[in-house]
Image (cartoon, rainbow, N blue to C red):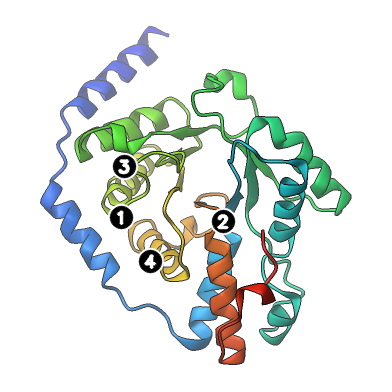
């Protein structure tokens, strides 16, 4: 026990000495945003990939069982069947990564998914509501929300990311999506570099989830590019990368409709989440 404790203290001391080069982070983020976005059939493939990485979310204080039920049905069938059929993806099991609701609506979500014979996972926000230690999670994944807008600097974001991973987090998340500052590309660069450093030193892969303000299909492609560039293809899977979003899926489906038909759908033509 003493040996482990001393190692932990040494690691904390090392982390406390880390300094992040702000200008380098901003320059890298700008480079990622300037990367060419895939076009035509490649874009459709990337958009479908983005859809499978979404934690389809409703965290409204007035959520009802019917809202959650509709969300679950959309998560099971995120893109219209006829569009998937034209892309030859109708039988590939395309779903979102999970549905995300407040703890009080978990039972509704589980019931709706079970009724639809779906094994899609249910995630729940526990920010400032339930504080759990790693030991209490058992086999369940522990996701730590950093609330990056409150950390003040990229250096603090890096340090918080490392401490969260050292404490046993399976995922680190930018924010709840409800704060004034949520997921930004520069903050993401810092967090995924911390994930990469942690992997290089321990061999353990930790997941990343940006949340808040991710609304357009084009933005989702930038996020996929960022993860591919910084962490590699291994992280482009629901087990290691999630997009926290509520309205993103609607624009992804709309863009896929355009890819398939050459026209943009009216909003009433696509089912709502």
Q: Count the numbered circles shown.
A: 4
| Image x and y of residue 269, in percent | 68, 77
Tell which circle, 4 or 3, labels the residue nearer the N-terminal end: 3
Q: In this view of the protein, which residue sits in the foreground, 269 or 123?
A: 269
Q: Secondary structure at mark 3?
A: helix
Residue drawn 20% across the image and 25% down it: 16
Q: Quadrant of the C terminus?
A: bottom right
Quadrant in the picture for residue 177: top left
Give how far apart the Cα atoms at labels 1 and 4 are. Answer: 9 Å
57 sits to left or right of 177: right
Residue topped by disc 3: 194
Q: In this view of the protein, which residue sits in the foreground, 210 or 234?
A: 210
Asked if the residue under mark 3 is in contact with the one under mark 4, i.e. CB atoms within 8 Å, the reply is: no
Q: In the image, which is nearer the foreground, mark 2 or mark 3?
A: 2
Give how far apart the Cα atoms at labels 4 and 3 are. Answer: 19 Å
Residue topped by disc 2: 54
Q: In the image, which is nearer the foreground, mark 1 or mark 3?
A: 1
Residue drawn 21% across the image and 60% down it: 28
3 sits to left or right of 233: left
Q: Secondary structure at mark 4?
A: helix
48 sits to left or right of 42: right
Asked if the residue under mark 2 is in contact with the one under mark 1, i.e. CB atoms within 8 Å, the reply is: no
Q: Secondary structure at mark 1?
A: helix
| Image x and y of residue 119, in percent | 78, 50
| Image x and y of residue 199, in percent | 38, 43
Give how far apart the Cα atoms at labels 2 and 3 are. Answer: 22 Å
Q: Which mark is residue 222?
A: 4
Instruction: Tell me if residue 145 can be seen.
Output: yes
The crowding category of the residue bearing disc 3, from other C-alpha atoms within 10 Å (few below 14, some 14 to 19, many at least 20), is: many
The crowding category of the residue bearing disc 4, from other C-alpha atoms within 10 Å (few below 14, some 14 to 19, many at least 20), is: some
Q: In the image, which is nearer the foreground, mark 4 or mark 3?
A: 4
| Image x and y of residue 96, in percent | 64, 58
């Amino acid at each position: 026990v003493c040996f482990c404790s001393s190692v932990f203290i040494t690691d904390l001391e090392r982390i406390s000495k880390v300094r992040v080069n702000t200008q380098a982070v901003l320059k890298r983020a700008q480079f990622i945003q300037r990367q060419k976005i895939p076009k035509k059939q490649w874009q459709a493939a990337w958009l479908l990939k983005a859809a499978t990485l979404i934690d389809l979310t409703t965290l409204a204080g007035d959520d009802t069982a019917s809202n959650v039920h509709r969300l679950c049905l959309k998560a099971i069938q995120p893109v219209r069947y006829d569009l998937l059929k034209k892309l030859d993806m109708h039988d590939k099991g395309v779903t979102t990564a999970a549905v995300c609701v407040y703890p009080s609506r978990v039972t509704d979500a589980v019931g709706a998914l079970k009724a639809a014979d779906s094994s899609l996972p249910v995630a729940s926000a526990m920010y400032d509501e339930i504080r759990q230690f790693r030991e209490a999670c058992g086999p369940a994944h522990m996701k730590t929300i950093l609330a990056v807008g409150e950390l003040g600097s990229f250096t603090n974001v890096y340090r918080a990311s490392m401490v969260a991973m050292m404490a046993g987090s399976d995922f680190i998340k930018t924010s709840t999506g409800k704060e004034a500052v949520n997921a930004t590309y520069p903050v993401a660069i810092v967090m995924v570099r911390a994930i990469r450093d942690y992997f290089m030193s321990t061999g353990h892969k930790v997941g990343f989830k940006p949340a808040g303000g991710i609304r357009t299909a084009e933005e989702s492609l930038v996020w996929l590019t960022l993860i591919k560039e910084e962490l590699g293809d291994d992280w482009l899977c629901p087990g290691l990368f999630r997009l926290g979003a509520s309205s993103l899926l609607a624009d992804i489906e709309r863009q896929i409709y355009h890819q398939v038909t050459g026209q943009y759908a009216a909003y009433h033509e696509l089912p709502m989440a």
